[in-house]
Image: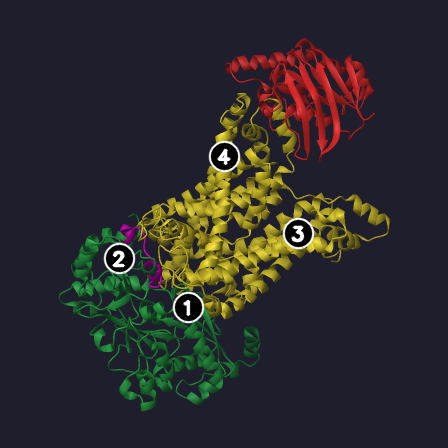
Amino acid sequence: MKNRVLPVVPALTLLVMLGPVLAGLYGTVLPAFGHLPAGGLVGPNLDAFRALLDWPGLPRSVMLSLTTGIGTTVIALALVMLLVAGWSGTRAFRALERLLSPLLSVPHAAAAFGLAFLIAPSGWIARLLSPGITGWTNPPDWLIVQDPLGLTLMLGMVVKEMPFLLLMTLAALGQTDAARARAIASALGYGRTTGWLKTVFPRVYAQIRLPVYVVLAYGMSVVDVALILGPNTPPPLSVQIVRWMGEPDFTARLLASSAALLQLALVVGALLFWRLGEIIVATLGLRWITSGHRGASDAPLRIAALSAASIAALSILLGLVVLAVWSFSGFWSFPNALPDAFSLKTWMRQSTGVLDALGETALIAGSVTLLALILTIGCLEAEYRQRRNLTQRGLLLLYLPLLIPQTAFLPGLQSLLLNVGADIGRAPVMLAHLVFVLPYVFLSLADPFRAWDSRNASVAAALGASPDGILWRVRLPMLLRPVLTAVAVGLSVSVGQYLPTLLIGGGRVATLTTEAVALTSGGDRRAIAVWGLMQTGAALVPFALALIIPALVWRNRKGLSHG
Amino acid sequence: MDKGLTLDRIAVFKDGKPLVALDHHIAPGEVLSVMGPSGIGKSTLLSVVTGTLPRAFSFTGRVHLDGRDITDAAPQRRMVGILFQDDLLFPHLSVGANLAFGLRPGGSRAARQNRIEDALAEVDLAGFANRDPATLSGGQKARVALMRMLLAEPCALLLDEAFGRLDTALRAQVRDLVFARARSRALPVLMVTHDAQDAEAAGGEVVTLGT
Amino acid sequence: MKSLALLAAMALPLAAHAQTDPADWDAVTAAAKGQTVYWNAWGGSTTTNDFIAWIGAKVQDEYGVTLEHVKLTDTADAVTRVLAEKQAGTDTDGAIDMIWINGANFAAMKDAGLLFGPFAEQLPNWQYVDVDGKTVQTDFTVPVEGFESPWAMAQVVFDYNSEVLEPMGSMQAILDWSTANPGRFTYPQPPDFLGTTFLKQVLVDTLVDASVLQQPATDDNYEDVTAPLWAYLDALTPTLWRQGRAYPATGTAMFPLIADREIDLSISFSPGAATAAIANDELPDTVRTFVLDKGTIGNASFVAIPYNSGSFEGAMVVANALLSPEAQARAQDPNILGYGTVLAMDKLDADQKALFDALDLGIATLSPEELGTVQAEPHPSWMTRISDDWTARYGVAQ
């Protein structure tokens, strides 16, 4: 990296990250106001918004979007906070932390499949309990998966977002002096949970506020999990947008665009509502803190939090196990606990397609992550050399692609890419993935990069090393573990992308995720299981490597072998 | 049993190896100074009393406070106050809210407010309730931390290198204040320090570890 | 590869854009050699995906055409894509070379001029197609006019668990049974293709005279004609699986429901699919099929080529390969796909016919005689309005 290039890297990074988002929003606005020349439709007019308001499913669809997003965020945040408050520093917590961290990289779709196969009335849990305990010979006619209120969807999202918030919280804890705050609080007579909530939570929350917003925005606009676990009578707004985007009737596209703008407005509204909630909670919280109550009901809270977190971790794990069972299953009827026979038939049958898709997935994820890593290191190194730190506003820009709902800008981005004639092959898909991969790679690497003891650089410089030499020969080798972790994060984010691959790839780019979700509608559980497992593997293996490689490379360097 | 804090044949082990041992009774209003170089396990000894001993350590012996055996009590139920080297005022709370956090629950808001004002006045900080702790000087922070601890009405006070960060002039001033407040409330005080002047100023017995 | 083709196209605009005459088959096969055909087809079924892969190997061997199966959850995705390309002015070498299509999607694309053609009746294998006996020249009453080529026949059958119930002869009988056995029947959620077909099947079976459906629906007659349908559904819905508060997404999504004993009866558009699913461990071997006394709705599946395909010659080669007796017999094999053929047996020579005679249709498949009368598809305008009304009545805010 030449010094002449380095100073423009931050601007370049912002461009590739935010350019597509802004362009996509622009491309959504035109059709929303009736302007779609190719369909013979010329605006501006408000017909699409009128049609949207006339759609009878709108109120429930909007409600679902809001309840899923807000419910997911409140429940996942509350559980994570109570868990950390009640258990951080204990052996149980470390065990759970080790369990939850890899679960973070299990793709949303695979986790949702596993959950569905587990908790459906004919799912594995019911099979294990039947007919012995339940007396069922036929599954009960209970509406669990795809329930109209979206509760199962919310459950799936909570289970999947908890590991994310937990990891973000653990990162923030390092900067809040939590251990000594706990010592003080306990010396002042405070229970573990209450003391933590009063002394550490306000500081931790300030640090994880943006990730919480990401969960809120994502929960409101998720498509793949909603396709698998969510209701259809009607579906959440985001699913309906994708559905309208796919209808042959051209005016449906206008409808989709106006709904996309509504979705954007909903997310913005929900974020403002949440901000208001923060202020109210802060006011009430201060009153609670200064009341001096020491927290008598800590014990039940602790147990509830640990149980909920364990159930969440177990449900993802068991979901993966049941996927594995299905993938080798012959005929398997209810209420048998296991299939009548096991076979490799499904794996053999799917192998060609799976391997092709794996290649495509790996190529896209690898290229995108490499690019994201180069840009990230470039940004961080430029920041370091110019002695300028990322401002709060800069951080917000970084989070922007994660806060704007995918369904709001990807349809418009599709039109834009077509306009510049870029819709050939996988390159535009990579560009779209980069929008989502970059922030995660940056966030993952930024803290360890900045926390690096710069006295190492002073020593190296005194020994005659150039700034580039210091970066390549001292800083990056010392940061091997966080760099590899950032790579693993980037890969798993890319592997999990559904909507960008589907919409921007135009169906030509077949990744493990698009193929797995495409199988949902067909209901072939054996095929779904094979694809879901492969998708999980593609996301998990990089994390395993990120752990193993530094241990091997630095096996003779004790100071570097423990992260 | 007597009033005061009793360390009854306490012996601390790290990974099964003996680290530090102490057998002592501290009467109300008295100060026991424990001295020794850093790393000897002075702070570990305090964590036996507060009930926050790290997992790598184990200990034998009993701890009694005012006749109660608190050896196995939960940390928050021991009524043992502690001051650390750093003031550790919570940065998200005002000075008044920090004190309110320490104050035992109960009483009207106005009554609580009054007690906080009184506590501030007691250490010459009247009118500081709405200040951001970050704007306070080192000596002021130390005084707020002390009062926060005392408002929780502990039955014993531990000092973990509590004056280590203060410069010499301030140090004597804060030290005298702490000992005076503790004595006026008849608290047994267990202080660990590596500074002989601290031990001297305390005026009580001195135990030197590691010799 | 595509970008290379694009560069070549820019360098040699005349040569690359020279229109190959669909009737000149030699020119078509010559141009097709080396082309890659992106076939956008529903990808939710492993058996279908395998069949498409087999066709791909066949055209690769015989014509040097590479076939890529772009797996869709919904055919309409492909229509949208072509529309988006037209909007953007991508008039050559679009992303899609061939679409599995029929009905409303075909009508929409044909109306909007988004299809290449006519080409279907110029294909060499068109000579074997059963033009008189099967609905291959109209698609939901819309004239095909060579803009799509047929490749499979579909007819409504009902899959049922023979351990639990007997075949039924009318939709009324099904309603009576479902009322007596609540929670044991469902159908895919409209606007899914099979879901709307179920609605049409109810309508066709409950109307005394179904011929009115062959004309476009009008504001005058729509309410009267569909009244029996809504009365039927109002009675049926509370007796459905999950009380009609959720529906399976597609036809094959009902296989696991039967296998799990969640339901005992479902609808299918493929007479051989149940047998194939039994062979594939997806259905218990007690499943059988039946049709209604008055017959059931049937139609053809087609492939169409978008106007902006850069590989339309290759796509024609694939369409022709799909019509070959070899491929048609393979598609009809219940162990492979179980789709009905569009060919006329009396137009085949003895060897070709032997391919079909050799097939064992399997335990759950009705013979052509047992399948009985095929009821014609109503005009698409009925389906559009019924589907919208269904959504308003049962699909939201239940």
How far is disc 4 from disc 3 in space, using C-alphas? 46 Å
Indicate which disc residue A303 carries: 4
> In the rendering, at what x and y percent does residue A259 appear?
40, 52
> In the rendering, at what x and y percent does residue A364 appear?
57, 63
* Residue B63 at least partly seen: yes
Tag 2–tag 4 contact (CB < 8 Å): no
How far is disc 1 from disc 4 in space, using C-alphas? 46 Å
Mark 3 or 2: in front is: 2
Position of the N terminus of chain B by quadrant: top right
Using the image, name the chain to which the residue with label 4 belongs. A
Give the chain ID for the yellow colour.
A
How far is disc 2 from disc 1 in space, using C-alphas? 24 Å
* Membership of A358 in magenta stretch: no
Tag 4–tag 3 contact (CB < 8 Å): no
> In the rendering, at what x and y percent does residue C209 appear?
14, 67
Q: Amino acid at mark 2?
A: Phe
Give the chain ID for the green colour.
C
Q: Secondary structure at mark 3?
A: helix
- Residue to which mark 2 is pinned: C185
Indicate which disc residue C46 carries: 1
- Residue to which mark 3 is pinned: A10
Q: Amino acid at mark 3?
A: Pro
Q: Secondary structure at mark 2?
A: loop
Using the image, name the chain to which the residue with label 1 belongs. C
Discs 3, 2: same chain: no
> In the rendering, at what x and y percent does residue B11 appear?
72, 26
* Residue B161 at least partly seen: no
Give the chain ID for the red colour.
B
How far is disc 1 from disc 3 in space, using C-alphas? 46 Å
Q: Is residue B3 left or right of residue A64?
A: right
